[in-house]
Amino acid sequence: MATVSLRNLGKKYGKTEVLHGVNLDVADGEFVVFVGPSGCGKSTTLRMIAGLEDVTAGEVLINGAVVNHLEPKDRNIAMVFQNYAIYPHMTVRKNIGFGLRRSKMPAADKVARIEEVAALLSMTDYLDRKPAQLSGGQRQRVAIGRAMVRDPAVFLFDEPLSNLDAQLRSQMRLEIKKLHQRVNTTIIFVTHDQVEAMTMADRIVIMKDGHIQQVGTPAEVFHQPANIFVAQFIGAPSMNLLAGRVVAQGLEVAGRHIARKTGREIGAAITVGIRPDDLRVGDGPGSFEGRVSVLEPLGAETLAYVDIGGQEVIARADGRSPPALGAVVQLLVAPENLHLFDTDGVAIR
């Protein structure tokens, strides 16, 4: 196991700067997930940790030692890629054991280690099969096993689940999380899927345009987003954003007064964020009134798209008795569940 630290990490391709002074400390045994849109720099950061990309500026430290100039094989890390990268002509046993080919470990110990890893991944019955005889999820487990067999200090995962269908992705998320709980190795995982980030991570690193926007636990980034980008990127459906202004005794939003302290002067413009989970279609008087324009049934719940004063918001309704399309409804929200942002998009605490 190991700690990983990034100190003012920067990356340029020619004159184009893609990573801007990234700072982060990953604790020993921690599961950290980098998430963000395509091109945000998350995979580049991972590849710099692995030694697959040169560091333009700053330092990468593993267990407190700077590794900028070390080859990937000398960093005691293992990487699992999106496309499995397993050998089709080799059996599962040989694929898993490939990482031990240069090891001085006795042959009997290598066999034992391969079988130990296969057992951890529930692949013992498939050791003599070739990749063509395996499902997508099983192939990904072989790729993980090949990384595990060397017992690295740090596991790096680069979008390993993106080629799997939805059911397999869900299954593999659970398996990787269980694996981390068993082996307790430091894991850095890159994904563009915020559901993967929320369900797997001890902490999430949210990136945009080569900058870290926020680092926190899944609960922190969901309930206390640092800015509008984080607020809308984390959570599905995205947070509703409404234009508002500060008035005496609270806020004015979509023509309604809401009693909520802001610490801002009267007349100041703010953006009010409301999670769809916190905005409910109700029977009694509500915070807002609007007309239902679209309904999205999800089974237990129905998402209602509601027009309030020319602004569309998403609210949750009971799946058994949703409102009718075109109906005028009351939307209920507790003032303490509002998220407030200033004109720069930064959260007002």
Image: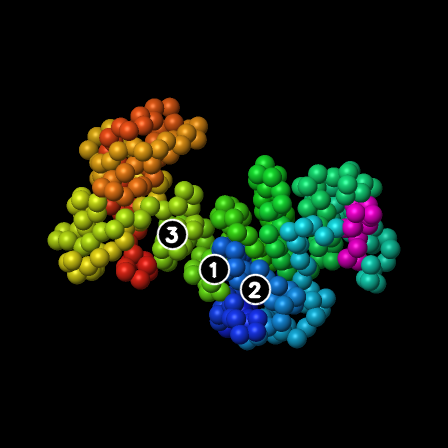
Is residue 28 shown to the viewer in this render? no
Instruction: Find numbered disc 1 in the image and state the secondary structure of the residue it sits on.
Output: strand
Most foreground residue, 284 or 40? 40
Q: CA distance from mark 2 to mark 1?
A: 10 Å
Tell me the number on the disc at residue 45: 2
Amino acid type of disc 3? Ala
Sequence-first tag of 1 and 3? 1
Instruction: Tell me which colouring the rendered structure shows.
Output: rainbow
The disc at residue 231 is 3
Q: Which residue is located at x 41 percent, y 42 percent?
A: 237
Residue 125 lies in the magenta stretch: no
**Mark 2 or 1 closer to N-term?**
2
Residue 193 spot, x, y in % from top left: 52, 48
* Position of residue 189 measured from the top left corner of the image (x, y, whole percent): 58, 55
Please check the rendered image and state whether residue 95 is part of the magenta-colored stretch, yes or no: yes
Prevalent SS, magenta region: helix
Q: Which residue is mark 1?
A: 207
Vertical position of residue 296 compared to residue 106: above or below: above
What residue do we see at 67% from left, 50% from top?
83
Q: Counting other residues with Cα less than 10 Å from the Cα at mark 3, is it few (<14), some (14-19), or many (20 or more)? A: many
Q: Amino acid at mark 1?
A: Met
